């Protein structure tokens, strides 16, 4: 049941709203439909910080001229297992829709393939690309960076992005195992939503502008987020920087911070996606072997496999309860 602050909106209405606003803001049809699919899938699966919540940021980056709403991604596939996608300074969804089929085909043929996506702006969740690969019998790994938002362990100054990492494993006949997590204690979008809705965030999420720990999301947004697990999360955030920037040639987070115009939209950056075929690497019997593993872990009390909640949400075809002020703001942008 919708609260006074939310409005019940069907998935069809969500998609129509997204299509309308992106067309109104000058995106061509290819980019419009790719963005709308991304936004609708996020709302469908309960990833609210990557759904309609992102639309004002997308619009801001279109209006500032930073992002090319008519981008035509280009693929280079000179090497059998290396795919390069130039996003033409557009949003990531169309670049990924262009490159993922090529990546999957290369991994199915060669056992492993790597895709670098450059000159693009990523503002969505990462699970759609890894889940796409897992649904085709492949292991998927994806990562990207952002502007400095997270202080490395021991520091109080932002240097890393939230640097998300997504992993998916195929489970033939069942939904794949999929996780998608920020390397910060909490994703920035979740902190922004908590600030909007007036909720505190868990201890250890971040520091205020005075460098002191706080549970107030508004203060953290003025200060810095912290990596999860201290030094361990910080090391993984560093690994993500090197994979999505060092391995692609696009911006590290600190470089994106220097070059971004701070219009509220996504920053330019790279993404690395890796696909591996268990069939070609592990060989016959991998499915049965891994099924035994999943049966064993699922038998433990209190276990919920990563991605289960998202896939359960997907089965619900009913309306989603969206922040009413956000809906009105997006309608004004149409």
Image (spheres, grey):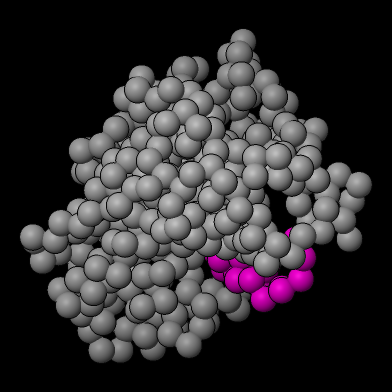
Is-magenta flag for residue 229? Answer: no
> Residue 225's quadrant in the figure?
top right
Above or below: residue 115 compared with residue 21: below
Please tell me which residue is depicted at 63% across the width and 24% down the height of the picture. Answer: 220
Observer able to see residue 121: yes
The x and y percentages for residue 102 are 24, 68
Please tell me which residue is depicted at 72% across the width and 31% down the height of the picture. Answer: 195
Above or below: residue 127 compared with residue 119: below
Count of labels shown?
A: 0
Q: Specify the quadrant that holds the N terminus.
A: bottom right
Looking at the image, which residue sits at the far top? 210
> Residue 68's quadrant in the figure?
top left
> Residue 300's quadrant in the figure?
bottom right
Position of 259 with respect to 11 (left or right) is left
The x and y percentages for residue 135 are 41, 76
Looking at the image, which residue sits at the far right? 4
- Of 238 and 189, nearer the camera is 189
State which region is magenta: 302-320
The x and y percentages for residue 78 are 8, 60
Looking at the image, which residue sits at the far left? 78
- Of 156 and 251, nearer the camera is 251
Observer able to see residue 149: no
């Amino acid at each position: 049941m919708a609260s006074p602050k939310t409005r019940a909106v069907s998935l069809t209405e969500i998609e129509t709203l997204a299509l309308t606003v992106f067309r109104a803001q000058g995106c061509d049809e290819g980019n419009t439909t790719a963005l709308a699919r991304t936004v609708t899938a996020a709302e469908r699966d309960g990833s609210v910080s990557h759904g309609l919540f992102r639309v004002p940021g997308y619009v801001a980056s279109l209006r500032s001229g930073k992002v090319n709403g008519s981008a035509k991604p280009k693929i280079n596939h000179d090497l059998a297992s290396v795919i390069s996608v130039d996003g033409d300074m557009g949003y990531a969804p169309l670049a990924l829709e262009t490159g993922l089929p090529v990546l999957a085909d290369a991994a199915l043929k060669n056992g492993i393939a790597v895709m670098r996506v450059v000159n693009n702006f990523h503002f969505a969740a990462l699970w759609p690309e890894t889940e796409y690969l897992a649904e085709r019998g492949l292991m998927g790994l994806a990562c990207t960076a952002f502007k400095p938002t997270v202080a490395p362990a021991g520091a109080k100054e932002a240097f890393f992005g939230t640097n998300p990492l997504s992993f998916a494993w195929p489970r033939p006949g069942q939904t794949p195992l999929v996780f998608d997590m920020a390397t910060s204690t909490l994703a920035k979008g979740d902190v922004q939503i908590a600030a909007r809705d007036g909720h505190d965030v868990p201890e250890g999420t971040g520091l205020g502008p005075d460098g002191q720990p706080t549970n107030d999301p508004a203060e953290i947004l003025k200060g810095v987020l912290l990596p999860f697990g201290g030094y361990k999360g910080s090391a993984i955030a560093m690994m993500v920087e090197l994979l999505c920037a060092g391995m692609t040639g696009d911006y590290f987070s600190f470089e994106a911070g220097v070059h971004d115009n701070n219009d509220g939209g996504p920053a330019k950056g790279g993404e690395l996606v890796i696909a591996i075929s268990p069939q070609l690497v592990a060989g016959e019997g991998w499915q049965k072997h891994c099924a035994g593993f999943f049966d064993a872990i699922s038998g433990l009390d209190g276990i919920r496999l990563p991605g289960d909640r998202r896939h359960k949400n997907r089965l619900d075809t009913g309306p989603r309860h969206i922040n009413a002020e956000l809906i009105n703001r997006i309608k004004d942008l149409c």
